[in-house]
Image: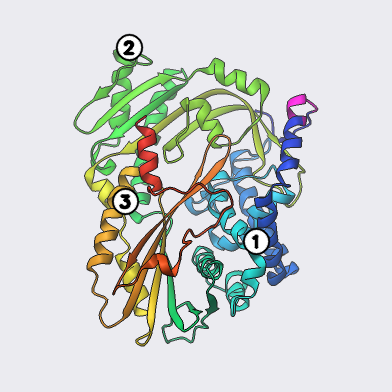
Amino acid sequence: MDNLKPLMSNSKQWEEHREFIKSRTQEKWVGDAKNALDWFLEVMGEDEWAKRKKAVVAYFKKQQESIFPENGKPQKYLSENEKAVAFHQDWTAWYLYLVESLFYRPYVSQPSQSCRIFPFFSAIGRHIDLIKNISGVDDKLHELLRGKINQPDAVLFEISVALMYARNGWKVSFITETPPEKSPDLLIEKGNISFYVECKRQSKVTEYSEKERNEWLKRWDKLVPAMTAYNTPTHMDILFKVEVSETNELVLVSAFNELVKNNMIDSGHFLENDQIKVSVKNIDMSSVDQHFDKYQVLWNSPQMISLFAGGYESNGNYTQIHSPKGINIVGPDDDEHVLNLYCSGVHSAYCAKWECISDISIDKKAKDVRKLLSKAIKQAPANGDTIIHIAYETLEGPQVEIERHKKIANSINTFNYGEKNVSAVYCHALQPSTGVEDSEWAETTIRFGRNGTDPTKILPHDLLLDEENTAISDDTHWLQDLLASLK
């Protein structure tokens, strides 16, 4: 394959795409996100932002140079920490870079990361005048943008909760922390009623999910040589009935070879035992080629996976390798553009979609909020009524989320709150998802009133990110996903 090169194209399709990209910056949610971005960068300072943005770009440039080394140069070694699709060293700068790119670098894209943070920036920007009047917000922004704690998700959640109360007519104040004393995040007041508010946000994925994925990758690494030796682009569907770690690392190799031996590739039949269920089909390379004849495809995007897998599910687990015919840089080749690589075609591709339905796996991925609830109660004051807000992301699919919902309801209803007067607990289940063409955001608020408190009276509008034209339902979004999958 040739070196990376700038894309020079005057084709009608690209002209139409450029016009689409240009028009997108006029969409209201993009303008709202930019309002928040401009405010944040003003607080951070121009020099500080330039330095931190440079570090973000350098991180991904190094990845790019490792995958596509210049002619005659050896491939650069990357540690596991340097292969991540997010800039873990500075999450705040990473988020700001993605939002800034939306407006100034439209061909820069990391869909799975962007869909997690765009809604927060858009909501803040949409109500920017309201939130700027919240007492203590300047100190909270300083914590987010210039503080040493690398946890922007937690701070963005606190700001969003504060904004939600302000939208519902409450006077809101951030409470200044005075270590080592524990204190809640907010004080809200309306007339002669007041509550303290404590916010907790769960990590994106569970430790078990990370371990399970690492176990999958061990089996994928063994499978790839068998698939490439078959010498025909293929896609494998795998269902693990037991924990992935309980299977032999060569289990998929054996299954693939058995399917080949019995002429079961692309037959519509599957191979099944008490541990796995697998089927393999040939990738329709003629359709893949036809698509690439018309379009460039963002490198390692959902659209690329969809071409190989014959479809794409936002909560699915996919892994793929391919041999590209060409990779083009779209946009300026400068010190600010990265993650702007587009594939012009592939010689071959191999792909797999996997899922584990083991009861043990589902149980361990359905992480409870009991620990966060305990931490929140410790920060509740001894005198005064407290409301707790907990956020978590629902990325594991409907089966896991149904089980998690049961655990959470049981924990909150049976928890020993001691002498702390907790009036209500709100759980915000958040689901960012990216598809082939676009992304979407779903959220479900689960309310628990205590001591006779009606949570709907405190927050009549309790969706965290008050997006305009949001479709509201009485069903949880994971139940909607489950019902949609059964159609």
Three-letter residue code for mark 1 = Gly
The disc, 1 or 2, on the residue closer to the chain's N-terminal end is: 1
Q: CA distance from mark 2 to mark 3?
A: 37 Å
Which image quarter is the C terminus in? top left
Q: Residue at x 30, y 37 (%)?
A: 249
Q: Is residue 29 positioned above or below 340 on the image? A: below
Q: Tell me: 138 left or right of 436.
A: right
Q: Residue at x 55, y 37 (%)?
A: 300
State the residue position of label 2. 263
Where, by quadrant of the figure, is residue 138 drawn? bottom right
Dot 1 lies on which element? Answer: helix
State the residue position of label 3. 365
Three-letter residue code for mark 3 = Lys
Verify whether residue 103 appears in magenta: no
State the image coordinates of residue 111 (x, y, percent, origin top left). Answer: 57, 44
Verify whether residue 14 appears in magenta: yes
Q: CA distance from mark 1 to mark 3?
A: 34 Å
Name the disc covering residue 125, or none.
1
Q: Residue at x 26, y 31 (%)?
A: 276
Dot 3 lies on which element? Answer: helix
Q: Main secondary structure of the magenta part?
A: helix
State the image coordinates of residue 46 (x, y, percent, origin top left). Answer: 75, 67
- Looking at the picture, tell me which residue is in the foreground, 358 or 7: 358
